[in-house]
Image (cartoon, rainbow, N blue to C red):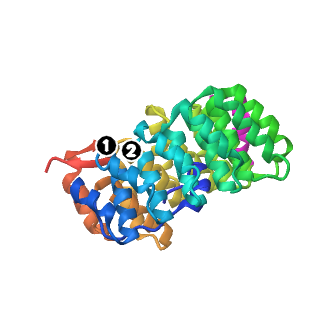
Amino acid sequence: MRRLVGLHLLVLLACQSPSDPEPLTDRPDREVIGLLGHGNPAVRMEAAAELGRRGGEGGFESLLGLLADPEPAVRAQAAEALRRIGDPRAAPALAAGLSDLDPTVRCRVALALGSLGGAAAVPALVAVTTDPEPAVRAAAVRGLGETGAPGALGAVLAAQRAESAGGDDPVAACAIVAAARLGGVAGLSESLALAGGRLPENWLLRAAAARAVGLAGDRGRTGLLVEWLDRDEDPRVYQSAASGLAMLGERGKLSAVLDHPAAARRRAAAAALAAVPGEEAAADLRRAARDPDPAVVLEAAAGLLSRGDAEAFPPVIALLAAEEPGLWLGALDTLVRFSGLDFGRDPARWSAWFAGRRAELSFDVAAGVFRSAG
């Protein structure tokens, strides 16, 4: 099972788009580029998405042209593909897209421009922090944070002030994270001061603050993260608190939560420990992989696999026999993701594969998958 992470997902909810089911992964670049001119918008979208996944310069110019596609969903996908490719030459075309009539397109364009436009993108993004659509304002604020330009901090705080009187919570949440990115501990402190008394009753702002503390490296607020991980009632908050502690490298604090009476807290800690380097964190994950709760086991095993520990395959295989669909589907997804194979919900076949390949499995860090010499 995968845990949703990253506050930007809240911004992108309005920007989601369907994709054509036909796989393009095995087609050469020239064929995929050719599909950008297909008469079916769904095909054009899938071709743009595939080029974005591949990265590189293949189809770059064609994707720029796709920003003028008659279908808003295609234009939005083109912007996302350009963001993934990360070529700053796309910045002028993306800046022009901020005036698109469709808010979904403006949302994706703002995120892309912030990601690759740098300091030069700040004026264009500042202009859309007053957009009538909350999702676009939030994307613009997040984009300002992504620019990494310290001079953008003032605009982020100004946007947060504008939202303080009955404004939109996702905009304020994105501002908290952006302020931490741009101004470190000082920027975060200013932003949290603006949030004021809204944190106790607003889960979204608390979740943003938890992540921002980690991003800013604010060790002075470690105690707040520990409190939220231990006691906050909203899972999105205590999961973000665990992630924040991981960013701070607080392995010991996360390890202690593996003994928490609530399985959901133990699972959050296990998920966060996967991002903490070192053998001590790996040992914590091995301990969590023996947890009595299968969801904690799955989270811990996935963390071990992500670190190249093939011995975490057996507990995941065992979870294929779970009755709860969320567990066995999560186990199957984990097995497919880390093996590159798909034997379905068949523990015997997975066990036979592992037994036969165990000695020769090696982890391809770049691809995030185990490969065998045989």
Magenta part, dominant SS: helix
Bin the neighbour count of mark 1 within 10 Å (Cα to Cα): few under 14, some 14-19, many 20 and up. few
Above or below residue 46? Residue 86 is above
> Which residue has dot 2 on it?
85
Question: Residue 79, percent across and down?
Answer: 46, 51
Question: Residue 205, percent across and down?
Answer: 73, 47
Above or below residue 341? Residue 286 is above
Bin the neighbour count of mark 2 within 10 Å (Cα to Cα): few under 14, some 14-19, many 20 and up. many
Question: Residue 95, percent across and down?
Answer: 53, 44
Dot 1 falls on a residue whose secondary structure is: loop
Question: Residue 285, percent across and down?
Answer: 48, 44
Viewer-proximal residue among 161 and 292: 161
Tell me the residue at 70%/48% (across/down). Answer: 171
Mark 1 and mark 2: Cα distance apart in space: 6 Å
> Which residue has dot 1 on it?
56
Q: Are marks 1 and 2 in contact (CB under 8 Å)?
A: yes
Q: Is residue 221 left or right of residue 246?
A: right
User: Which region of the structure is painted magenta?
Assistant: 217-231
Q: Earlier in the sequence, mark 1 or mark 2?
A: 1
- 229 magenta-colored: yes
The amino acid type, in three-letter code, at marker 2 is Ile
Dot 2 falls on a residue whose secondary structure is: helix
Q: Which mark is residue 21?
A: none
Tell me the residue at 23%/62% (across/down). Answer: 352
